[in-house]
Amino acid sequence: MRKHFCVVLFAFFASAFSTLAQDQAAVARTAAGCGPSQTQFDAKLDDTLHLLAQPERGKAIVYVFEDDFTGPTMRIGIDGSWVGATTGKSFIYFSLAPGDHSICTEWQSNVFKKTSQRVGGAKSLTVEAGKVYYLRMTFEEVTQASGRIKFELADYAEGQFLLSSSALSNSHPKK
C-alpha cells in the first residue's frame, strides 16, 4: 500500500512540475510578444499591392518583411497576440500605439510543433506616432531542431526597396 501511495504521489508531482514548466514557457513567450502556440494562419500572397500605408492619427505603422523566397509561414506577434503571418518573400503591416512593444516571430508548423517553437525571434521596439517602421526578418542558424530569426530595423530607402520587391501577405487565423 505504501509503495502504491509513493508511486501515485511521484506521478502527481511529476505532472505538476511538467505543467508548471509549460506555463512558465508560455509566460516567457507571451512576454517576448508571441501569441498562443495553437493559433495557426492561412496566408495568401498578393504581389500587386506595394502600398505605403499612412499611419492613423496618433499611431505608427510597422511593416514586417520575410526576406526568403522559400521561407516557411512565419507568425508575427505583438505584445502577446498574433497579428498575422508571412510566407516566402512577403510582408504584413499594422498600426501600433506609441510606446514600447515586444515583437515576436515564430515558424508555424502543425507537424513539428516543438521544433516550430524553437525557430523564431523577438525584438523590443519603441514607436512614435506618425512614423513608419520597417522590420526585416533574416534567417540565421536554422536547423531541423532549432533556429534563430533576427529582426533588423531597416531605414526608409531599404524599406521602400523591400516593399517594391515583396508580396503582401493576406493572412487570417485558421478555423
Image (cartoon, rainbow, N blue to C red):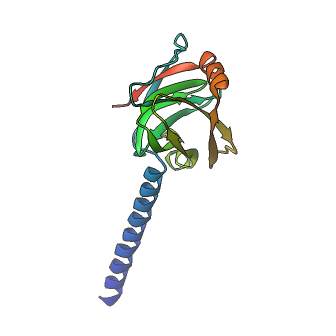
For the residue pair 105 and 40, the one nearer the viewer reads as: 105
| 115 horizontally vs 79: left or right | right
Whether residue 40 appears in this view of the structure is no
For the residue pair 48 and 88, the one nearer the viewer reads as: 48
In which image quadrant can residue 151 be found?
top right
For the residue pair 112 and 155, the one nearer the viewer reads as: 155
Which residue shows up at 66% across the image and 36% down it?
A: 138
| 151 horizontally vs 14: left or right | right
Whether residue 44 appears in this view of the structure is yes
For the residue pair 145 and 27, the one nearer the viewer reads as: 27
The answer to whether residue 85 is above or below residue 44 is below
On the rendered image, what quadrant is the C terminus found in?
Answer: top left
Q: Which percent across, then down, holds residue 38?
A: 40, 43
On the rendered image, what quadrant is the N terminus found in?
Answer: bottom left
The answer to whether residue 15 is above or below residue 62 is below
Q: Which percent across, then down, holds residue 136?
A: 62, 33
Q: Which percent across, then down, holds residue 19?
A: 38, 64
The answer to whether residue 113 is above or below residue 3 is above
In which image quadrant can residue 159 be found?
top right
Q: Report the label total.
A: 0
Q: Which percent across, then down, holds residue 40?
A: 42, 36
Which residue shows up at 66% across the image and 19% down it?
A: 161
Residue situated furthest bottom in the rendering:
2
